[in-house]
Structures are given as C-alpha cells and as structure tokens.
Image (cartoon, rainbow, N blue to C red):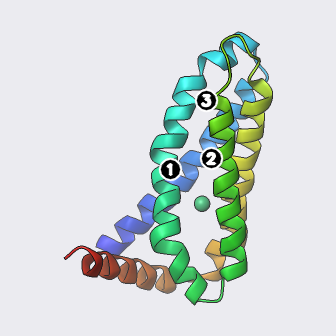
C-alpha cells in the first residue's frame, strides 16, 4: 500500500540519520585530517537527503501535526532543523587545515538528539492509523497544490 511505503521511507530516513550520527561521533575521535577529509561528503548528506527530509517535514508533515495539537513539539523540531543548517554552514565555511572535529561532533550530537526528540515526543503521539491518515492527507494536499 502506497501510504505504508511512504511511512516506511520516512522511518528509514530517520534510521539513516541515526546511523550517520553514530558514524560522525566516531569520526570526530579520529585525526583532524581524517575528519576534514569527510567534510564534503557530510555536507552533501546534510544539504541533500537531510534537507529534503527537513523540507518534507516542515512543508507537509508539521502543519498537520500542529493541527493535531503538537504545536510546541513542532516548534522545537523546527529550531533543531535550523540549528543543524547553521552548523552545516559553519562547516562549509571552515578553512582548509582547520580542525573541524568539534563541529562534526556537535552535528552528530544534534542529529541524534533531534531524531530522538522526534522519536520520543512526536512520532509516538500518533498511532499507525493516524500516520496513514496523515500520509493520505499529505498526498491529497500535494495533489490540490499541484493539479
Ligand atoms: Fe526532523
């Protein structure tokens, strides 16, 4: 079923963010050179798949969650998205030879904190049936928006 596939994809993205955070925390313990070597692939992840995930949540999912009384939680999640974007900008601006391990560790910590926050405070508020309903509304809204 379409909605179940969308749901599985969404949760799969969360799992990938968690794996990435663990990998980054490990990386931050290695040499400054090996951490710096990962800079561009990390930025590609944040500005590619992660940004798409944030954008989907912010444009499609969060407005629906706000309508279900989760406005305060959504506000926290949006702040975390923005903080992660800010850290990515900082990383992008790091000069060659700069030790970016602290920054990479901060990104890892916030990424993990954020996925845990959504997993603990937002996602469990909805039952599987709610989720399917939400996906359905999201798809319908998209279709109305771009007929
Ligand atoms: Fe998120």
Label 1 vs 2, first from the N-terminus:
1
Dot in front, 3 or 1: 3
Tell me the CA gap for discs 3 and 1: 15 Å
Dot 2, crowdedness within 10 Å: few (<14), some or many (≥20)? some
Outermost residue on the left side: it is: 147
Q: Do residues under tags 1 and 2 come within 8 Å of each other at their CB atoms? A: yes
* Image coordinates for residue 125, horizontal then vertical, percent: 65, 81
Residue 51: image tag: 1
Residue 41: image tag: none
Q: Residue at coordinates 65% horizontally, 54% vertically from top-left?
A: 82
Q: Do residues under tags 3 and 2 come within 8 Å of each other at their CB atoms? A: no
Tell me the CA gap for discs 1 and 2: 8 Å
Quarter of the picture containing the C terminus is bottom left
Q: Which residue is mark 3?
A: 92
- Decide: is 11 above or below 32: below
Secondary structure state at the residue bearing disc 2: helix
Secondary structure state at the residue bearing disc 3: helix
Tell me the CA gap for discs 3 and 2: 10 Å
Dot 3, crowdedness within 10 Å: few (<14), some or many (≥20)? few
* Image coordinates for residue 27, horizontal then vertical, percent: 70, 25
Q: Which residue is mark 2?
A: 85
Outermost residue on the bottom side: it is: 68
Q: Residue at coordinates 72% horizontally, 63% vertically from top-left?
A: 117
Secondary structure state at the residue bearing disc 1: helix
Residue situated in front as seen by the camera: 57 or 88: 88
């Amino acid at each position: 079923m379409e909605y179940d596939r969308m749901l599985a994809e969404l949760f799969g993205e969360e799992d990938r963010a968690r794996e990435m955070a663990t990998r980054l925390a490990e990386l931050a313990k290695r040499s400054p050179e090996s951490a710096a070597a990962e800079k561009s692939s990390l930025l590609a992840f944040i500005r590619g798949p992660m940004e798409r995930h944030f954008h989907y949540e912010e444009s499609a999912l969060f407005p629906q969650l706000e309508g279900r009384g989760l406005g305060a939680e959504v506000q926290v999640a949006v702040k975390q998205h923005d903080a992660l974007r800010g850290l990515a900008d900082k990383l992008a601006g790091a000069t060659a030879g700069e030790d970016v391990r602290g920054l990479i560790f901060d990104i890892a910590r916030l990424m993990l904190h954020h996925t845990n926050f959504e997993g603990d405070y937002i996602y469990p508020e909805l039952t599987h049936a709610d989720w399917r309903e939400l996906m359905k509304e999201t798809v319908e809204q998209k279709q109305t928006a771009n007929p």
